Amino acid sequence: MVEFAQYSARVRPLKHALKVGLLKQARRIQAVADALDDRAATRQVHELRKKYGPLVAKAEQDQDWNEQQKLLSEWEFDSDSVLDPVYERKGERLSAEARKYGITVSPKPRNNDERSDDWRLSRIYGFWMPSVQLEQRLRSEIRSERRASYDEFRKWATLSFAVAGFLLAFYSVRVAKQPDPCARNYYREDSGQCVFALDKIAQPAKPSPRKEIARAKR
């Protein structure tokens, strides 16, 4: 039992180092890094809900409205600290995908004092994030462009299959109608060779073995 505990104590740091190394390599892929960060943010938001939820409920039960407002403000600040980077990354990915389809994306405001219906400013980090209206518009237009691209691909795929079927049928008919390579007055034997028909007729009929035996007895 003691040996097993010692073995586990030695293996645990090695497993941790291996895990950290694998995550570091995986994070070199941007999509994987974003997915890991989003998952971590979701877990942190869940922890914040577990932390502040009971406190806000208790303050409401005690009718301590000042404490409740204070807790709600702290909860909102901590949540924005976690979620704003997620919204910023999703906005960048959404904008890049929209531009790939040729969809116009309104530019971000240059100054923090500017007002925009498409972008909202993070009060914690100071960067711009897409508004709900902009996200809905871009997602709708991206779906329309995807549908149009799929319809175009399906049209060309159908045409390609039709042309391929026509060529295959034409080739099959041409092979079926290919003339016999044997010249006139020739016929094809079972072996596939072309034999002159008159040579076959001129050859004497080979007598049967029974007639040969009867002739020898005479």
Image (tube, rainbow, N blue to C red):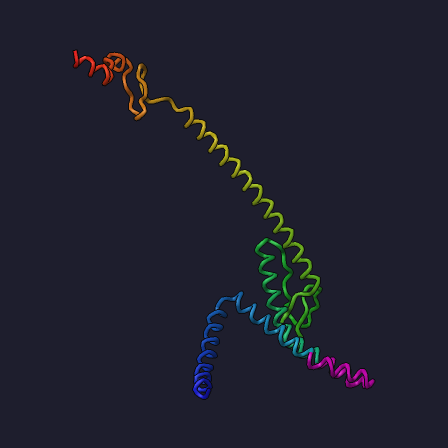
Q: Position of residue 133 (x, y in %)?
A: 71, 62
Q: Position of residue 27 (x, y in %)?
A: 50, 70
Q: Is residue 108 visible?
A: yes
**Relative height, residue 152 to residue 111 (above, below):** above
Write the residue at 31% across / 22% down: 189
- Residue 199 located within the stretch drawn in magenta: no
Q: Is residue 125 visible?
A: no
- Quadrant location of residue 35? bottom right
Write the residue at 48% across / 69% down: 26
- Residue 57 located within the stretch drawn in magenta: yes
**Figure disc tally:** 0
Q: Position of residue 40 (x, y in %)?
A: 59, 74
Q: Nearer the viewer, residue 8 or 45?
A: 8
Write the residue at 69% across / 77% down: 49
Q: Quadrant of the C terminus?
A: top left
Q: Is 151 left or right of 61, judged from the image as shown?
A: left
- Quadrant location of residue 46? bottom right
| Residue extending farthest right | 63
- Quadrant location of residue 159? top right
Write the residue at 74% across / 80% down: 72
Q: Position of residue 156 (x, y in %)?
A: 55, 41
Q: Which residues are magenta?
A: 50-74
| Residue extending farthest bottom | 2
| Residue extending farthest front | 217
Q: Nearer the viewer, residue 175 or 163?
A: 175
Q: Is 195 left or right of 177, judged from the image as shown?
A: left
Q: Nearer the viewer, residue 110 or 76?
A: 76
Q: Nearer the viewer, residue 37 or 115?
A: 37
Q: Is 112 left or right of 9, judged from the image as shown?
A: right
**Relative height, residue 77 to residue 26 (above, below):** below
Q: Main secondary structure of the magenta part?
A: helix
